[in-house]
Structures are given as C-alpha cells and as structure tokens.
Amino acid sequence: MPVETIPLKVLRNGEFHGADPAYYVKEGDQWKATTWRTYADEVVAAGKAMIALGIEPGNVVTILGFNRPSWVISDVAAMAVAAVPAGIYTTNSPRECHYILDHSESPLLVIEDEGQWAKIEQIRGELPKLRHVVMMRGGPEIDDPMVMSWEEFNATGVDVPTEELDARLAALEPNQLATLIYTSGTTGPPKGVMLSHDNLVWTASQAIHATGISKEDTSVSYLPLSHIAEQVFSVHGPATSGWAVYYAESIEKLADNLKEVQPTVFFAVPRVWERFHAGVTAELEKATGARAKIAEWAMGVATKTSKLRNEGKEPTGLLAAQYAVADRLVLSKIKKALGLSNTVIMVTSAAPISVDLLEFFASLDLRIQEVYGQSEDCGPSTMNQSDAIRFGSGGRAFPGAEVKIAPDGEILVKGRNVFVGYYKDPEATAETLIDGWLHSGDLGEIDDDGFVWVTGRKKDIIITAGGKNIAPSPLEGGLKNHELISEAVVIGDRRKFLSVVLTLDEEAAERYMLEHNLDGPAHLNPQIHDEVQQAIDELNKDFARVEQLKKFAILPRQLSIEGGELTPTLKVKRNKVNEHFADIIDGMYAG
C-alpha cells in the first residue's frame, strides 16, 4: 500500500472525483474549470517529463512565478517522482535567485515569463547544475537552447512508461524529504526548511478536520506559493479535501476577482486586511444622516453577535432578530462588496495583526481566525478555531501538536508538523530542533485556557544602554493601530532611550491632508506630526518610563521589498531599516 502523500491524493481525486472541478482560471470574462481528472493527468504528464529530462529522486525542482496551475502542477509532479520542489519568490533579485538555485543545485527551473527569465539569463553562467528551464503554460517563447515551452516539456515525457512514475510514487517514505521552503531571510541568507511527506499530509489533514472545510468549498490563490501558508491553501488542503481553487489574475486584480468568485475560504496576511479596512472605512465615512446611524447600529449588533460566536454560542431572542435585520440592511452588502459574502473561514497569519483590525472586521460580521506558526512546522503552531477565538492570541495548540513555553519565554512546538531540519545546515538544525522540540525564536505566554499570546521575537529584543531588555512588538503594534501609521520600527539597541521611525498610510494621509486643506509632503506636515505625537503620548501611558518612546521620525518613503527593508512576506528587516535610514535615526539621538 503506497504511503499517503500529496501527489497520491491528487491522483486519487482524479480517479474518484474526476468530474469535479479542481481549479479555475479566468479566460476573457469567464472562469473556466479544470476537473480533478485533468489535473491528475497534468501532474502525471509533468512527472513523466521530469523523468525524461533526467530528474532523479532527491533532485530539487525550482519554481519561479505567480500563482497559476503550472506552478502547482510542477510542485506536485516533482513530489510524485521523488524530486523536491522549491519555490522562489517572484520579487527576488537575480542574486537572490542565484543563491537558491546554487544552494539547492537545481537542474530544472520552471518560470513564468520574460521578466523572470531576464533574471536567470544574468546568472546562468554561474549555475553549472542548471540544465533546463521550462516556461509555464501560456508563457512567451524564449529563443534559447536551455528554455522549452510547457508543451515541449510535456512532450518529452510521452514515451516514459506511466509505471515508472507509479514506481517512484509507491517508493516514497513518510519521513522522506517532500519539499523545501526557503525562508524569506530577515537577518541573513534564506534557509531551506525541509518538510517531509508526513509533515505535509498530517498538517493538511489536521487543519481540514479542525475547520470542517470540504470538497464543496472554494478559495482564491494569490499570495506567494513559495510560502508554506499559501501552499496549504492552494496545494495540500485542496488535495486532501478536494476543494476547488480559483487562481487570481494578479495581485492588482484580487479585489475584482474576489467579487466575482465570492469564495468560502479566504486567507490573507495583515497587509491585505489593512487595505480592506482602509477601503471600507473610506466608504463608511461617506454615509451621513440616517444611513450612517443604521450602519453604526448594524456594526454594533454584529460586534455582539461575533463575541458570542467566538465563544461557540449563537445569538438568540432579540439579538438574533436584530442580527437578521442588520445583515439584510448593511452587513450582507458590505461583505458582497468585499467578495466575502460566502466566506465562512477567514484566516490571517505570517505577521502580527492588530486587535483593533480584528474587532473592526468582527463588527462587519467577518470573524478572522488568527493562526500563529512558521515554515518550520508547516505553517501552524497554534490556531483560533471558529468556536474559540480570542482576538490578539495565536489560538490554542494546533490539533495533535504540543506547545509549551521555555524558561526564557521562548515558544516551543512538538508534533508531526515539525520539520526535518535545514537543508545542508546541520548546525542551524541542531540549534533550532532540540529533542524533537522546535525552538521558534518567538517569545510568548500561554493563558489558563490554553491560548498562546506571542509577545515578541528573541532576536528583536532591544537592550538599551542602561541594560534594560525591551520587546518592541507591543509598541510597534500599538502605533500601527493608528489609521495614519502603516509601519513602525522601534530603535534603541545600545541607545540611551527608545525612539521609533514610522511610515504613513498613504491613503489615510492623503485623506487627512484633503480634509484639513493642507499642502506639501504629508511626512513633513506639522499637523500630521502633532497627530503622531498624540498617538505616541497615548501609547506611552501603558508602558514603564524606560519602555516609553521619546522621539520619532516619519520616513520620506514606504519600506519596500525592492528597497530591501521588507522580505517577500512583508516582514521588516530591522538591520536594513537601521542601515538605510541611519542619518535620520542618528539625528534623533544627536545631542
């Protein structure tokens, strides 16, 4: 009996649920479905092509492109033939692409378009192991002997017996390396997180059992597939439960695609939820008179209803009647406009999210479940479940896993979701994986009801000149709750006091400038500086004197991936912020 693996599940879906839709792609104005049978056939064809091109068990197949069927087909096919898929972020520079291709010794790279090929063309001479580059389906023709089209790629495997792929699939072992997730590298080069077939299958199965997602559900794929969280929602979860995935046309068209699809499952990082919040807030501010009062009343009703549902209860009596009216008059319209009218499971992860934001969406009858974790445990260490949600917490331990707090406050995780180790890095593995416990690098607490609260990163701890250890996360999170502030980075390591550099939310700042009839750059405007100072003064009241922010500076531009201050998953690289804005930071401490 073959071992349970993600590719085996895809092939079984093709056999037993062949006529059901597996994924949708937009063609013109229509979303066109592809069945599980066809998807399974596509995986087999790509797997046979990999065998024909000489891909051996253990070889790494790299994938570089935006979310589309060819990405996932390549990923699943590589696992099926005992190779190891590894995604590369589309935002990676040629040097960053080189690092992963060289580190993994990848002989085969699947890419999306000319823009990604241009990066590879620059570095190909430094990659002796790279033999083949395959363009994803629908990609442009590249006149280069190393590059083949998707059709040419599939044609190479036509004469390979399907039994050869079957044999490789049947020989897979539970603890065998299934995939590599290259971390986004906040402090140095990315590390290759090794996840086994058992890691992937067990985690997906547990998540589906906990959430109740079924083959009747739908999701939209748009976040980077190089990230483990999006793989759970676009690859492993659908393979396990059989739900259908809609591939967004692009990040820019996500809002339109959501409105068209109205998925039942939606996963977003905090930045996406923040954009939704800004859009809804702007629309609500346009309401006046009776409309504004009805909206305010409806949101109050939804807040009360959400609090009950977060505890596993349902509204009754008068509140139930009020909720029905509020939903009909206001809530259903807002949810439909966002593309979330059918959504029953909404998840946020990958970075901290403010409680204010979660409460705002709860007032729209959109209860977002926060999940805490990392690539090293397949995504979830803890999760809030629909009948047990505490805003601001990571939730309780992921079903079947153990979570505890070390004496120094570090969050430790143990379970079948915990990774095998770091690729070609036994030293880092030994530091992170001790006696089966994943040392997360995060600091946290567990309350009496088992909810885990993340309080900061060990490596982010600021040690002031006075020797005080301070976690910056609570300060940064508190500031980001203010509508004018998009990002906040606390400074103070080996300094006499804490300060903070900020970026403004561009839309909110523009609105503020218009409403107050102000001119010039927003980041230099004295009135906006006064607003920020008031936010800091209010925040400081909740902290001891040594933890209070004494000065701030508003940066002249946003932090960005291109600028080097953000990772592809939008985490802040503190060292780069300190380096790139050194003059501004030093100015706060001058004298």
Image: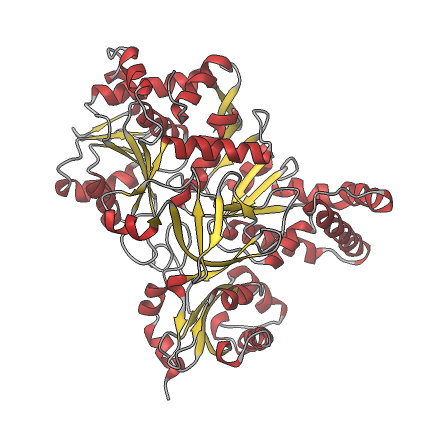
Image side of residue 375 versus residue 209, left or right: left
Q: Residue at x 56, y 30 (%)?
A: 218
Image side of residue 317 versus residue 350, left or right: right
Q: Is residue 57 above or below residue 349?
A: above
Q: Residue at x 56, y 76 (%)?
A: 540
Q: How is the image coloured?
A: secondary structure
Nearer to the camera, 518 or 67: 67
Does residue 248 show up? Answer: no
| Residue 422 image-quadrant placement | top left
**Which residue of the protein is positioned furthest toward the bottom in this rendering?**
591
Q: Position of residue 443 (x, y in %)?
A: 46, 60
Does residue 558 show up? Answer: yes
Q: Residue at x 26, y 10 (%)?
A: 161
Q: Is residue 230 above or below residue 471?
A: above
Q: Position of residue 338 (x, y in %)?
A: 62, 43
Marker count (numbered): 0
Q: Is residue 111 above or below residue 530?
A: above
Nearer to the camera, 390 or 91: 390
Image side of residue 415 versus residue 327, left or right: left
Q: Position of residue 222 (x, y in %)?
A: 46, 39
Image quarter in which the C terminus is found: bottom left
Nearer to the camera, 262 or 310: 310
Nearer to the camera, 529 or 241: 241
Q: Is residue 316 above or below residue 514?
A: above
Image quarter in which the N terminus is found: top left
